[in-house]
Amino acid sequence: MTRRYELMFIVRPDMADEDLDKLIANVESSVTSASGTVKSVERMGKRRLAYTVRKFREGVYILLTIEGAGNVIHEVERRLRVSEPVIKFLTVRIDQEQKRLDKIKKLREARKKLSAETPATSAGEATPTPAAETPATA
């Protein structure tokens, strides 16, 4: 079963661009070798970290969108753990979120369609209201 994941990892700030290209190519090749596909690669650039991680205050952020099974992510995370220049990484499954948003959208459309189908009463007509039952008190 193919699922969609976002993989963000932070690399040392003193890493050369050529080495960064090699690292990204290595991650992409590990995804494809595990029968997954890389949908997009986004380099977010060098940013300041919220706290010190492995004695670094800054890091280069890279975001990958990956499609594949769970074993693909397991293999990629294993390789990132042993990779020296990678400071931190995080993998998030995003297909569940997309499914949830699609479900909410369908519910909203159904409500909109239902409210459009009910006839609107004009101002001159009186709408019948059910009589409120009051309990008898003794």
Image: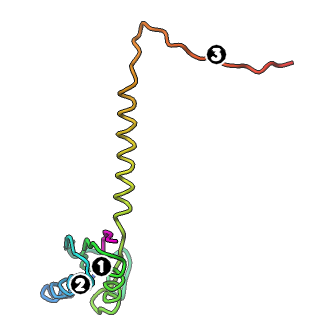
Give the SS element for disc 3: loop
Where does label 1 land, which residue?
9
Where does label 3 land, which residue?
131
Instruction: Point out the frontmost of discs 3 and 1.
Output: 3
Q: Residue furthest top?
A: 124
Segment colored magenta: 1-8
Q: From the viewer's perspective, is residue 113 above or below residue 42?
A: above
Instruction: Name the one closer to the observer, 54 or 61.
Output: 61
Q: At label 1, which amino acid type do we have? A: Phe
> Could you tell me if the residues under marks 2 and 1 are in contact, i.e. CB atoms within 8 Å?
yes
Q: At label 2, which amino acid type do we have? A: Val
Within-10-Å neighbours for mark 3: few <14, some 14–19, many 20+? few
Where does label 2 land, which residue?
27
Q: Residue furthest left?
A: 18
Q: At label 3, which amino acid type do we have? A: Ala
Circle nearer the N terminus (3, 1): 1
Circle nearer the N terminus (2, 3): 2
Mark-to-mark CA distance, 3 and 1: 64 Å
Circle nearer the N terminus (2, 1): 1
